[in-house]
Image (spheres, coloured by chain):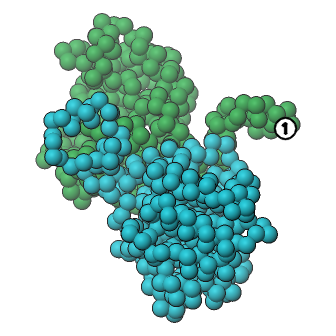
Chain colours: A cyan, B green
Amino acid sequence: MTDTMISSRSTEVVIGFEQPFAVIGERINPTGRKLLAEEMKNGDYSRVEADAVAQVAAGASILDVNAGIPLADEPAILAESIRLVQGVTDVPLCIDSSIVAALEAGLAAYEGKALLNSVTGEEERLEAVLPLVKKYGCAVIAISNDDSGISEDINVRFDVARKIVERAQDFGIPVSDVVVDPLVMPIGAINTAGRQVMELVQRLRSELKVNTTCGASNLSFGLPNRDGLNTAFIAMAIASGMTSAITNPLHAAIMQSVQGANVVMGHDAECANWIAANRDPNVAGRERKGRRGGRRGRG
Amino acid sequence: MTDTMISSRSTEVVIGFEQPFAVIGERINPTGRKLLAEEMKNGDYSRVEADAVAQVAAGASILDVNAGIPLADEPAILAESIRLVQGVTDVPLCIDSSIVAALEAGLAAYEGKALLNSVTGEEERLEAVLPLVKKYGCAVIAISNDDSGISEDINVRFDVARKIVERAQDFGIPVSDVVVDPLVMPIGAINTAGRQVMELVQRLRSELKVNTTCGASNLSFGLPNRDGLNTAFIAMAIASGMTSAITNPLHAAIMQSVQGANVVMGHDAECANWIAANRDPNVAGRERKGRRGGRRGRG
């Protein structure tokens, strides 16, 4: 049983084996969003704020914030995005950049214990990022690739994850603060990609005792009806023991799949969240009349 | 690796660890369907035939046929239903009754190797049904309850399954012809019901080497938005190794979840079925023009 606690100023979220699945909202990311990139570069963060509010309303428990805009001052934009997002929502954030200076700027701006996205098994990255994780006392996503790239052999990806966990321990970072991304490959290209993830998640959990995350929508890359496939995949990843994912909470079918998977895993006590989210308003009205003072659902 | 082969006159279907998930259509069952019960009792099988055709069109690979109507001649009605369904569809059938005489009448009427639904661990039932399975060379669904009822302890349910498999072997019935139903309990009443099924399926597969099935919709009994919960559950059951389920193929979300799960399991080679089922008609038209003579999808 491993709990990864992260927090904002006032809210703690625990990613853990016996916790509801943590949805990390992926929308605040200018990659592939030209308009958003342009706005952020010009100091207009209105869409960042709106995306933050909408994702939390849709059920995200953590928000990823990325400011990867070519030729822009990424550290400054990421720090400002984080300050503004923390002003409009209360969920913990995942500070996301490929640039170490941006990660540090984000950590400096952040209030609470962040999730840092990410460290890999690459030597240079390990040496640059792990000291930041230790300095700021945050948690970190560990991606299972290293200087030789991404292996199609899951044993190699597992060994990379173990190396990162061990190296983190050398820096005084507890295992519970490392959340491993086993890497999801496109199943249109690699037929075994789904089973790879399920097997890796089980091993990461039973052998390394770490929490896990992934970019859930990578699986469906290049295929039609990606949401439909992602919806099945995320429930299957949860069944295999995955404890969080970076995905789009604005897709209702995916969120319903996560909520259903929480019920099936026994992580929705008395199915209270499921009942609240799916209650017929008329029935709910009658029920409320009949049982004043009972437990209040979210619906 | 265990393959359970069943057949109609001309079509074989294999339920197996490395096969696409087998959906057993549940609609031809008068339980809770007053109009259908009345019609079947009066010799009107038009709805039975229509339900058969519709379920196969929706993707069922096997059809369950049940004629459990109070105060009716169930053996005769079941046999007639089976003859008529075999006249309008070509998929193998699952002959379903709680009355042994009806099972035998169904088997006598059936052309091919049927799936018999069901035997339990009850002594009387074992002694009555297993000789029929042997005599007709069919496969059989083994439900994990016995004379003491349904246990909430999964170890007891596993032991009942093992007892049935062993008893079947005493009758000369191979393990591959026994498909175990680990019993799905309502999760609104038993919070661990989902994990029970997932754990039992894994054990049944790794220890007893049997294929598995279940009444998938039992899990959501008493809860709102049952289809939504069933959709997540069936993908999770498949991730755990379940190889078939008795469910309603007319629910599009459930069938999409099964198709998606087949992709994730690596049981949809080159994602061909997924692509065919989800192809944008306009894109498909352009693609077809460009690649004459290529593999034909179902779409």
Q: How many marks?
A: 1
Q: Position of residue B94 (x, y in %)?
A: 39, 31
- Front residue of A138/A151: it is A138
Q: Is residue A148 left or right of residue A92?
A: right
Residue at 61% of width from left, 55% of height from top?
A: A46
Above/below status of B142 relative to B239:
above
Residue holding disc 1 = B291
Element type where label 1 sits in the image? loop
Dot 1: chain letter: B
Front residue (pair B81, B219): B219
Q: Residues within 10 Å of mark 1 (few under 14, many from 20)?
A: few
Where residue A126 sits, quadrant-wise, is bottom right
Q: From the viewer's side, name the closer residue of A200 and B267.
A: A200
Residue B87, image x and y in percent? 49, 16
Name the residue: 76% across, 31% down: B282
Q: Residue furthest left?
A: B148
Residue A284: quarter of image? top left
Q: Please state which amino acid type lies under the numbered disc 1.
A: Arg
Q: Nearer the viewer, residue A39 or A186?
A: A39
> Which residue shows up at 73% across the image and 61% down it?
A42
B247 relative to B70, above or below: below
- Left or right of A287, for residue A203: right
Quarter holding the C terminus of chain B is top right
User: From what the image shows, is residue B80 above or below residue A253?
Assistant: above
